[in-house]
Image: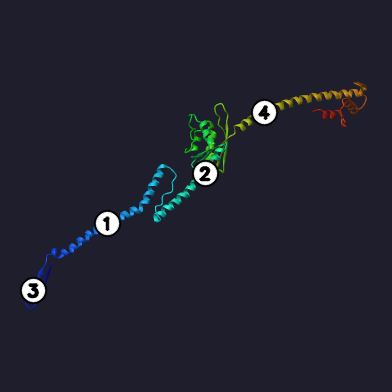
Amino acid sequence: MASVKGIAVADWVLGITVPTAEAHAPVNDIRQNFIWVTLLLTLVASGFTWWMLRRELSPLLTTAKLLAQTAQSNTPPLALPVTGQNEIGELVGGFNQLLHILGQREAELLQSEAFKSAILNAMSSHIAVLDHNGVIVAVNDRWSSLAMDNSNLPGHAAPHTSIGVNYLDMCHCPGDIGESSAQTAHNGILQVLQGKLPSFSLDYPCHAPGEQRWFHLTATPLESGVVVVHTNISEQKLNQIQLARYRDHLEDMVAQQTDSLEHSNAALRDNEAKLYKSAQLLEQTGAVAKVGGWEIDLNTTMVDWTTQVFRIFELEPCGLQSVDQASSQYLP
């Protein structure tokens, strides 16, 4: 650094030069000291800030660890400890209140599910709930028992009858149901799922070794799926078959009795004709006949003669005017 000044009296020029490092030395010292002080204050502030943050955020870290442990142990979440009446304490308190409400709702949901499950298991029918794709999402105990009974592998359920599998696939592997009935069931349930039918029902055979069985299938739509109910109607079907056999037997007996009655009526008509001819012959010849202690004057009209005969056998002709009318009254 240089500074020059002219002196007019002496006609001199005065110049002074100072090295830059020497001129800036105080400034450099102050700047150096400021940097060291700043670094020291920064370290102190950082340490203090770290300590404060750790102290204030330690409840959050503890809460996070407790939540992680709860998630890993699959246990119901418990209320978290509140360490202070500050923002974090209020946050943890709000979270505990949320856990309490969720716990109540979960308990109500579990109670509702248990109630629904109890109702399903109390039904005598075999019930399965399908989603909109036909996948089984819930079954009752009777459905599970039937699936085990119809399985070819002991201890395993029949194919396409367990939760998580597509029930409609069973219609492509019908087994004892029969190809026609299986395809009809597939189309009917699919149309109910698609909203094309309000409901669907089908009677189909499902015989087991040594046992004849029939089931009635009904599919009823739900908001997001369909309920499939299989009801055992084997007793009704067997009763219908037995009744049909009885009906056929009775029809055969009626036909036989009808034929027998027709033959009897024909024989009676022949006897009536012969009797009528004999009566006409006796009326023409005139005679008196004795029957037991009764005497019949044969030389009378046909009506009087018939009346006498009916009185002998303690019958009432009821004002009948001919033998044909009397015969028709007392013949079956």
The spot of residue 3 in percent (x, y) is: 12, 70
Q: Residue at x 79, y 23 (%)?
A: 267
What secondary structure is found at the residue carrying circle 1?
helix
The Cα–Cα distance between marks 1 and 2, rounded to whole angstroms, is: 58 Å
Q: Is residue 191 visible?
A: no
Give the mark toward the camera: 4 or 3. Answer: 3
State the residue in front, 316 or 264: 316
The spot of residue 154 in percent (x, y) is: 48, 29
What secondary structure is found at the residue carrying circle 2?
helix
Which three-letter amino acid code belongs to the residue tagged 3?
Val
Give the mark toward the camera: 1 or 3. Answer: 1
The spot of residue 288 in percent (x, y) is: 93, 22
Q: Is residue 268 visible?
A: yes
Q: Which mark is residue 266?
A: none
Q: Label 4 belongs to which residue?
A: 246
State the residue in front, 119 or 75: 75
Crowd rating for badge 3 (residues with CA inside 10 Å; few <14, some 14–19, many 20+)? few
Q: Residue at x 61, y 32 (%)?
A: 235
Give the mark toward the camera: 2 or 4. Answer: 2
What secondary structure is found at the residue carrying circle 3?
strand
Q: Which mark is residue 111?
A: 2
Q: Label 1 belongs to which residue?
A: 44
